[in-house]
Amino acid sequence: MQGRIHSLESFGTVDGPGTRFVVFVQGCPMRCAYCHNPDTWAMNGGTLMEAEEIFEQYKRNEPFYKGGGITVTGGEPLMQVDFLIDLFTIAKANNVHTCIDTSGIAYKPTNTAFIEKLDKLMTLTDLVMLDIKHIDPAKHLELTKQPNEGILAFVSYLEEKGVDMWIRHVVVPGITDDDKYLFDLGYFIGQFKNLKALDVLPYHTMGENKYEKLGIEYPLKGVPPMEKSKIVEKKAVILDGIRKRRSEK
Ligand code: SF4
C-alpha cells in the first residue's frame, strides 16, 4: 500500500517517547492559523511511497531507536488510514513502538467503513498524540476552519479502545492563552483514563517564511511568539482543570 508522503525525518526527538523515525504524510483538511507546515496541506502533493520502502529506511538506523520507534505525523495521518494499517502491521511484526500524531479531524463516528479500519489501526498503535487546538467549538472553527465535535468524540473513542494518549496544545498569545479555556480543556481531558501526558507548546513564528514561499498570506502576522517562561503557568492552568475533574470522581 502506498502512502502520500511529504518527508521523512530520521532522528525526531519531540514526536513521542525516545528517538524516533518520523513520517510526515501529505494532506490535511484543517487550516490552523498557526500551522507551520502549510506545505503539507495539499491532498494531491507529496511523493507516493510503499510502506515496506519506508520501513526499510527505518531499519537502516534501527539501533538508534532503542526506547523510541516510528511516529506518523503530517499533514493529517488519519486521512491515510489504509497506508497506516500497512506500515504499522510491518512495524508491530518487528516489535517497533508505533505512534500517531493527529488532529483527530478525520474521525467520523457515523462512517462505519472508516471506523472498521480505524479499529484495526488502533490494535496496531501504541500511542496517539492528539493535538486539541481549542476546546471551545466556535473558537476552534475560527482558528482551524473545522469543527471540534468529532475531535472531542475521538478522545472517548481512544479511551474505549484502550490506546494511550498524550494531549498536545499550542499556546498562542491572544488566541489560545485564555485561562478559562485552558482550564476547560483540562477539565475535559481529566475524565479520560488513557491520558498519559500533557504537552503544552509555545507558538513560534518559524513557519511564516513557508507561507511567503507558497504565496499565502500569513494569518497570524504580527502575533508575537509565546514566551517560553509563560508556558509553565499556562500548563498549570490545564493541570488545575484535570485535577478538578479527577477530584469529582
Ligand atoms: S492539523 Fe497540523 S498540519 Fe493540519 S493545518 Fe493544523 S497544524 Fe497544520
Image (cartoon, rainbow, N blue to C red):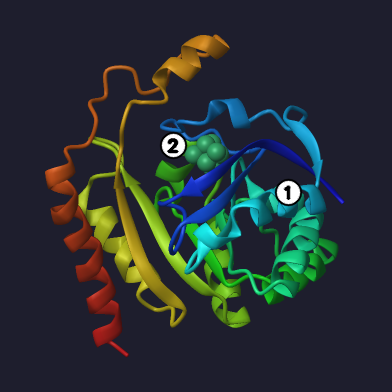
Residue 9, by quadrant, is top right
Determine whether, in the image, residue 61 is placed left or right of residue 177. right
* x and y, in percent, of residue 5 in the image: 71, 38
Position of 179 relative to 142 (above/below) = below
Q: Nearer the viewer, residue 196 or 139?
A: 196
Residue drawn at (57%, 66%) of the image: 153
Calculate the distance from the C-alpha at mark 2 to the C-alpha at mark 1: 33 Å
Determine whether, in the image, residue 111 is placed left or right of residue 246. right
Residue drawn at (81%, 70%) of the image: 116
For label 1, the crowd category at 10 Å Cα-Cα, with few meaning under 14, some 14 to 19 and many 20 or more, is: some
Residue drawn at (59%, 53%) of the image: 61
Position of 115 relative to 27 (above/below) = below
Q: Disc number at residue 143? A: 2
Residue drawn at (74%, 57%) of the image: 84
Q: Nearer the viewer, residue 170 or 174?
A: 170
Q: Disc number at residue 218? A: none
Q: Amino acid at mark 2?
A: Leu
Residue 198, by quadrant, is bottom left
Q: In the rendered image, which residue does mark 1 sit on?
A: 54
